[in-house]
Amino acid sequence: MKKIKYRYQLPPCSIYDVPAMEAWLTDLAHKGLYVKKAGGRLFAFAYEEPSDTCYRLEPAANDSVKKQPPCDMQDDYANAGWEFAAVLQKSFFIWHSLRPDADELHSDPLIHSSAYEQIFRRLRTNAVSTTLLALVTLAMYVCGMLLSPQPVTLFLASPSMPLLVAFNLISCIQAGKQFYNIYRLKRSLAGGFPASHRKNYRRGLILRRTADIFTILLAFALVAMPAGMFANNWKKSVPEISQAIPYLPLNLLEQGQDFSWHHDSYIRNGVDAYNYAEFSWTLFVPAHYEVYQQGEPNSIWQNKDKDAIATVPSAHTEYFRVAFPCLATSLYQEQLRHATRYGTSPVMTEVSHPGFDRVTTAVSEGLTQLFARRGSQVIHIEYWGSGSLTDKLDLLAEVFE
């Protein structure tokens, strides 16, 4: 037996736009392509001699339909001149006929309207639930951005959330259009108007194709991005890192001081909690490093209340290489605005250096912060110690290279 070779095509319209679907299938039959299998996104056609075959979509009686309608139904429809072609998404039976005198499947518009009741209810429920999900997701994201003290950082660190919001909104629009197509058809039939079997399915085709491609890409990104992040992110103790990473070693900052690394290691999940570095990436931040270093207490000093405090040299570095320079500018400005989060009023100083677009220091009691930006790179260093960060700008510029 010769194996049938199928030709696959994407439908140019929603499967719930019944007149457009019937017109499309009929036009393809005139070209010799006859539908054999039908899915929501892909149809399989077999090539035969072109004919004047016409197609009709009949709402399936229930959701349990899998392969074909009941035998008695096929016999009744065959007597009227129609043959079964395929099941479409468990929602429709597809019938075709070559007989010009074939009776229409439905002569009474009111009875025809009632045949769509089950599909109507299902699409209405789907449209409502999809809309609610999209609104809840959007509200959560907007509230999170408005309430966050660092919305730019939040946006860069969690790009999956805006993608999820966009995906849900597009899904909401598509579900709404599907429901509207059936609602409009059902209302027309309930008004006593016979069903139309012709519609221009090419109108708006480019927009629909673009939306479909965009939806597929969003879905792929939502699946692939967390997997890629899990596969590439790492966290290690600083001495175990062999590759060059963008930070200033604490022993260089404390050069000339009585410095020694923290003696008592606190190992958590195989990583020293006092001296570690971690790497992560997102769609908007191809490289994000966070490095924490701590030494042993090396001196005693008095604060303004004359309390004796041991100085524990430490440094926390956060480095971003963002996808677009405009994001780096916004991130740098946000980091500066967030410099006072320790409840102090640091002295802000703009520093000029040929290796950076902008450099700013923020000095408060016991803490020096340095913010630097060059192109798409931003670094923020928090340093508790007696050394000077500005003296190491040449070294930091080399690290950026």
Image (cartoon, rainbow, N blue to C red):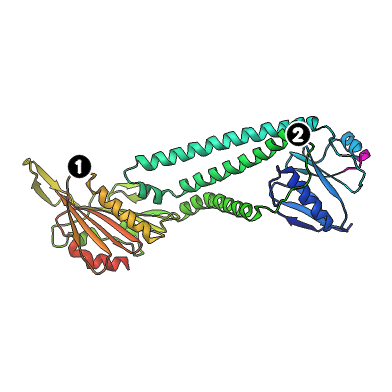
How far from the left and from the top, in percent, is residue 51? Answer: 88, 55
Depth check: give the residue in front, 194 or 275.
194
Whether residue 275 is visible here, answered yes or no, is no
Give the residue type at disc 2: Leu
Under tag 1, what secondary structure? Answer: loop
Of callouts 2 and 1, the N-terminal one = 2
Whether residue 205 is visible here, answered yes or no, is yes
The answer for how far apart the CA atoms under marks 2 and 1 are is 69 Å
* Mark 2 Cα-neighbour bin, 10 Å: few <14, some 14–19, many ≥20: many
* Mark 1 Cα-neighbour bin, 10 Å: few <14, some 14–19, many ≥20: few
How far from the left and from the top, in percent, is residue 57? Answer: 79, 42
- Kindly identify which numbered label has been placed on residue 189: 2
Depth check: give the residue in front, 32 or 235.
32
Magenta segment boundaries in residue numbering: 78-82
Depth check: give the residue in front, 374 or 369.
374
Q: Of helix, strand and loop, which mostly describes the magenta segment?
A: loop
Q: Quadrant of the N terminus?
A: bottom right
Tell me the quarter of the picture where residue 217 sits. bottom right
Give the residue type at disc 1: Gly
Q: Where is 393 relative to 127, above or below?
A: below
How far from the left and from the top, in percent, is residue 307? Answer: 8, 41
Q: Residue at x 35, y 56 (%)?
A: 289
Residue of label 1: 343
Residue 354 on the magenta segment: no
Q: Residue at x 24, y 67 (%)?
A: 395
How far from the left and from the top, in percent, is residue 269? Answer: 38, 47
- Kindly identify which numbered label has been placed on residue 182: none
Q: Quadrant of the C terminus?
A: bottom left
Q: Residue at x 36, y 50 (%)?
A: 152
Q: Where is 160 relative to 121, above or below?
A: below
Q: Where is 400 relative to 347, above or below?
A: below
